[in-house]
Amino acid sequence: MKTKALLLITFIFSLITVNNRTMAQGHTFPELPYEYSALEPYIDAQTMEIHYTKHHRAYFDNFVKTVTENKIEHLSLEDIFAKVSAFPAAIRNNGGGYYNHMLFWQVMGPNAGGQPEGALMDAINKTFGSFDRFKTEFENAAKTQFGSGWAWLAVDADGKLFVSQTSNQDNPLMDVAVKRGTPVLALDVWEHAYYLKYQNRRPEYVGNFWNVVNWKRVAELYKEAVK
Ligand code: MN
């Protein structure tokens, strides 16, 4: 009887522990919406697995640890980013790493690529002149980001699209960003995102990104952002 009770307590405790590892006050480590190999041959399975299970996981775990220590675990990511300069650097770096990868996984997918449709395509044509000119501007942002960082397509406060680049794990939602807005497309240009397959050939990785962009998801994010 005693053993059974002890086993039950151990079982319940293990459930709580597992739950704490993946969630803290609504901050959840997201499921990867496809297999590690789903983006082959453009992004290899080994890179995806390490990127998701090691890099993204570490940002999430450290973010949860840091917001808990600073007693701001009740704040949303958006609220934290809006005044991120007031918080310790660990919150900026790990919160950015947590959010940026969550978006990155969503805006890619298997059987993707091509071009956007509808309101998003209209806005791209209006802002950049053409889809090809947008692609060139985005690729330039990704290729010229010095060192680690990200390239973005985002919507500003007036509902207008813009392309930008940020260093490290910063993003356009942060008060430290040069251009502020709501991201709808993200490209990770840290070496950990491409080095196993592309080594130093970042431009090739950037060019191949178009084959895996999930424009349907990007269009949904755009619709939300201009609301
Ligand atoms: Mn990354």
Image (cartoon, grey):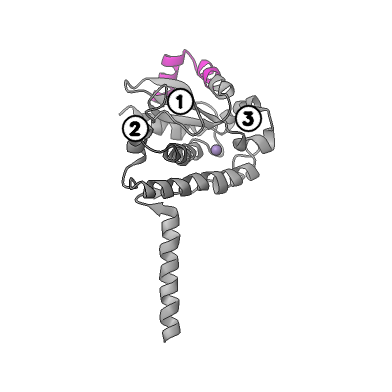
Residue at image position (56%, 39%) is 110
Q: Nearer the viewer, residue 11 or 68?
A: 68
Q: Residue 153 carries which label?
A: 1
Q: Quadrant of the C terminus?
A: top left
Q: How crowded is mark 1: few (under 14 residues within 10 Å), some or many (20 or more)?
A: many
Q: Where is residue 104 in the image (x, y as percent from the top left)?
A: 50, 36
Mark 2 vs mark 3: in front: 2
Q: Which residue does the image show at 46% across and 25% down from the upper left?
A: 153
Q: Quadrant of residue 99?
A: top left
Question: Residue 209: x and y, percent?
Answer: 58, 30
Whether residue 33 is visible to the viewer of this picture, yes or no, is no
Residue 76 percent location from the top left of the image: 33, 42
Spatial separation of the CA atoms under disc 1 and disc 2: 18 Å
Q: Quadrant of the N terminus?
A: bottom left
SS assignment for the magenta stretch, majority:
helix
Q: Name the residue under label 2.
A: 82
Q: Which of 114 and 166 is in front in this view?
A: 166
Which residue, given by chain and number where applicable, does mark 3 sit on? 205
Which amino acid type is shown beneath numbered disc 1?
A: Leu
Callout 2–callout 3 Cβ contact below 8 Å = no
Whichever of callouts 2 and 3 sits on the residue coming sooner in the sequence is 2
Magenta-highlighted residues: 119-138
